[in-house]
Amino acid sequence: AQTVTQSQPEMSVQEAETVTLSCTYDTSENNYYLFWYKQPPSRQMILVIRQEAYKQQNATENRFSVNFQKAAKSFSLKISDSQLGDTAMYFCAFMRVGNNDMRFGAGTRLTVKP
Amino acid sequence: KAGVTQTPRYLIKTRGQQVTLSCSPISGHRSVSWYQQTPGQGLQFLFEYFSETQRNKGNFPGRFSGRQFSNSRSEMNVSTLELGDSALYLCASRKSSYNEQFFGPGTRLTVL
């Protein structure tokens, strides 16, 4: 079974600074996707970034980038130039290719302080 | 393009009752998945429907059921409600298994 672990229940960062959220996962699969989702206080889950396991290049989306270490089964999210609107719960998620059962970590509550 | 919509947004029921939640996916999306979110258990997968067929099911009792209609809209039903069923129920849609999911705002169910 696939499990996703987020070891940081809460984190905070000063506005304009950089923060990294950790995620590790356990799987015997070789083909899978990894995601970071953001859930602001309004509760709508929003996809932040997606990584295909077969791609060695780390995904980036503007201020968001990942450090994907397949051998170590690690998938961390780096947020640069943090903004107040980045305050939210962040969930790391795993999905096997062709399967539709997305597994989520417990989440990290990020607070960006002015 | 309109996002995933869920109705109702809030619901209060008492133990033993049943409830039906509705989800309308993004136009063109044929896959609809349901998740339960609680502070204790986090986000847990309930089931997924594709073209009116249940393709995958999580580890939930038979009191939780669902269906999908020909227009891809989906409903989730919970019978004989228990206090522990109080949760945020999220629906997500996608075009296919190879696309990311888009989530709705959720239905907050409170069981008294």
Image (tube, helix red, strand yellow):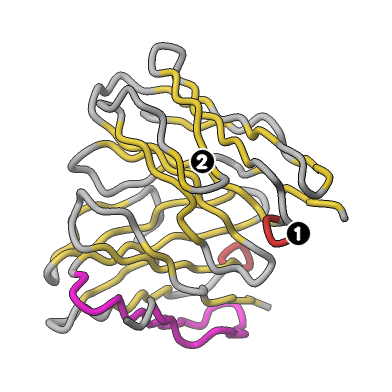
Q: Which residue is drawn at 23% across and 43% down?
A: A99
Q: Which residue is drawn at 25% across and 26% down?
A: A54
What amino acid is at disc 1? Leu
Q: In this view, does A73 lie to the left or right of A64?
A: left
- The N terminus of chain A, quarter of image: top left
In front: mark 2 or mark 1? 1
Q: Which residue is drawn at 14% across and 71% down?
A: B52
Residue B26: numbered disc: none
Q: Is residue A108 left or right of residue A3?
A: right
**Residue A27 image position (x, y, % from top left):** 36, 23
Number of numbered discs present?
A: 2
Q: Nearer the viewer, residue B112 or A63?
A: A63
Q: Nearer the viewer, residue B19 or B88?
A: B88
Q: Nearer the viewer, residue B13 or A48?
A: A48
What amino acid is at disc 2? Cys
Q: Is mark 1 on a helix, strand or loop?
A: helix
**Residue A25 image position (x, y, % from top left):** 46, 26
Callout 1: chain: A
Contact between labelled residues 1 and 2, with CB atoms less than 8 Å apart: no
Magenta stretch contains residue B31: no
Q: Which residue is drawn at 76% across and 59% down?
A: A84
Which residue is the site of mark 2? Answer: A92
Which residue is the site of mark 1? Answer: A84
Magenta stretch contains residue B9: yes
Q: In this view, does A76 lie to the left or right of B19?
A: right
How far is disc 2 from disc 1 in space, using C-alphas?
20 Å
> Mark 2 or mark 1: which comes first in sequence?
1
Q: Is residue B103 left or right of residue A7?
A: left
Q: What stretch is highlighted in magenta?
A: B4-29
Name the image quarter holding residue B32.
bottom left
Instruction: Identify the residue at the far top of this view.
Output: A71
